[in-house]
C-alpha cells in the first residue's frame, strides 16, 4: 500500500467515524418512531459550540465535555417533549417538517447564544502528528476512532440487553431523542479540534450522516456504522484522486444512487411501506 493511499484511508476513516455517529442518531430515532430527525446535525453543533463556550468560561476540558453533552441531551429531550409529542398521531411527513423547523430554530438560537464565528477546540492530547504505515495521523484522529468504536460497542450491548430497539413505545421515543442528541454532541466534540466548529457546522455533517444512514439502510445500527465509514473513505479517495471540489457532492451522489438502485440500503429491511 502506498503512503498516499494509506493517508487517504486514515483520513477517510476519521471523518467516516463521525458520519457513523451521526448516522446512528438517525437510526435510533427512526427505529423508535419511523421519523427522520433532520435536527440531528444541530446536536453536533451544540456539542462543539457548548464545549468551546464552557472551556472559554474556565471549565477544564474534562468537565466542559460532559456538560456540553448534557446540554445537547436536554435540547434533544425538549425537542421530543415540546415538538414531537404534541404532534403524536400526525403523519410522518408532518413530523419530519417539525424536525426541519427545529433545526432552523436551533441554528438561529445558536447565533444569539454564541456567535457566527469559527471556533477552535484544543486537541485532547496534543497535535504532534504520528507516523503510521507511511502516513501521518493526528492524535485527535485516534480519539475519534477510539471513542467511536467504544460507543458502537456500548450501543450494541445496550440494545441487546434492553431489548428496546425498534419498540415504538413512549419511553423509548423519549430515550431515542436523548441518546441521539448525545451521539451527535460527542461527534461534534471529537471533530471540533480537527475541523473547527461554528453555528452552522451541523448542516453538512447532518446531511452526510443522513447519507450514511441511507447507504447502510435507514434504521440499521450496523448499516449506519458501515455506511459512515464507507462514505468517509469514498469522500477522502474522491477528494485525493479526483478533486477536492467534488468532496461534498459525493455524499449526495451516493444518496441518489442508493435510492435508485438499492432503496433498502446495504443492511436495511425490504418493505412495501412508503414513508
Image (cartoon, rainbow, N blue to C red):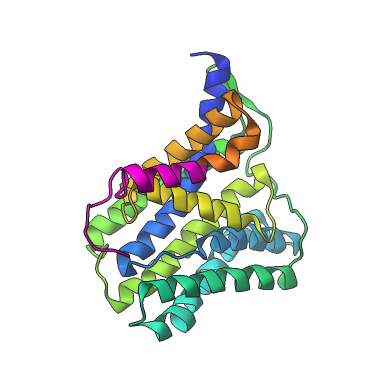
Asked whether residue 62 appears in the rendered view, the answer is no
Quarter of the image holding residue 123? top right
Query: What's the magenta region?
Result: 251-275
Task: From the viewer's perspective, tell me whether residue 222 is left or right of residue 107.
Answer: left
In the rendered structure, does residue 271 fall within the stretch colored magenta? yes
Q: Position of residue 111 (x, y in %)?
A: 73, 68
Q: Is residue 4 above or below residue 92?
A: above
Spot occupied by residue 230 in the image (x, y as percentages of width and height): 43, 37
Q: Looking at this rendering, what residue extends furthest in the bottom direction?
A: 86
> Residue at the spot x=74%, y=67% of the render?
114
Residue at figure coordinates x 51%, y 27% from the top left: 9
Above or below, comparing residue 249 to residue 1 in the picture: below
Residue drawn at (56%, 42%), measured in percent from left and top?
A: 249
Q: State yes or no: residue 192 in magenta.
A: no
The quadrant the C terminus occupies is bottom left
- Asked whether 68 or 105 is in front, the reply is 105
Coordinates of residue 94 in the picture (x, y in percent): 42, 76
Quarter assignment of residue 54: bottom right
Across the whole image, how many numbered discs are drawn on residues? 0
Q: Quadrant of residue 90?
A: bottom left
Q: Position of residue 241 (x, y in %)?
A: 58, 23
Amino acid at each position: 500500500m502506498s503512503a498516499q493511499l494509506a493517508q487517504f484511508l486514515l483520513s477517510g476513516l476519521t471523518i467516516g467515524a463521525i458520519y457513523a455517529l451521526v448516522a446512528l442518531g438517525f437510526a435510533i430515532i427512526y427505529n423508535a418512531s419511523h421519523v427522520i430527525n433532520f435536527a440531528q446535525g444541530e446536536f453536533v453543533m451544540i456539542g462543539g459550540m457548548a464545549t468551546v463556550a464552557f472551556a472559554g468560561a474556565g471549565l477544564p476540558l474534562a468537565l466542559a465535555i460532559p456538560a456540553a453533552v448534557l446540554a445537547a441531551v436536554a435540547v434533544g429531550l425538549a425537542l421530543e417533549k415540546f415538538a414531537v409529542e404534541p404532534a403524536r398521531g400526525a403523519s410522518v411527513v408532518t413530523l419530519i417538517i417539525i424536525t426541519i423547523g427545529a433545526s432552523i430554530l436551533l441554528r438561529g438560537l445558536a447565533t444569539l447564544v454564541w456567535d457566527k464565528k469559527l471556533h477552535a477546540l484544543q486537541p485532547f492530547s496534543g497535535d504532534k502528528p504520528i507516523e503510521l504505515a507511511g502516513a501521518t495521523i493526528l492524535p485527535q484522529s485516534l480519539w475519534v476512532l477510539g471513542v467511536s468504536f467504544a460507543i458502537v460497542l456500548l450501543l450494541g450491548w445496550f440494545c441487546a440487553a434492553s431489548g428496546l430497539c425498534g419498540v415504538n413505545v413512549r419511553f423509548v421515543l423519549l430515550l431515542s431523542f436523548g441518546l441521539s442528541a448525545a451521539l451527535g454532541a460527542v461527534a461534534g466534540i471529537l471533530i471540533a479540534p480537527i475541523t473547527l466548529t461554528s453555528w452552522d457546522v451541523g448542516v453538512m455533517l447532518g446531511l452526510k450522516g443522513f447519507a450514511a444512514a441511507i447507504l447502510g439502510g435507514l434504521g440499521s445500527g450496523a448499516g449506519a456504522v458501515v455506511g459512515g465509514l464507507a462514505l468517509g473513505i469514498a469522500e477522502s479517495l474522491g477528494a485525493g484522486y479526483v478533486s477536492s471540489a467534488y468532496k461534498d457532492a459525493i455524499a449526495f451522489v451516493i444518496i441518489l444512487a442508493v435510492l435508485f438502485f438499492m432503496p433498502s440500503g446495504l443492511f436495511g429491511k425490504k418493505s412495501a411501506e412508503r414513508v
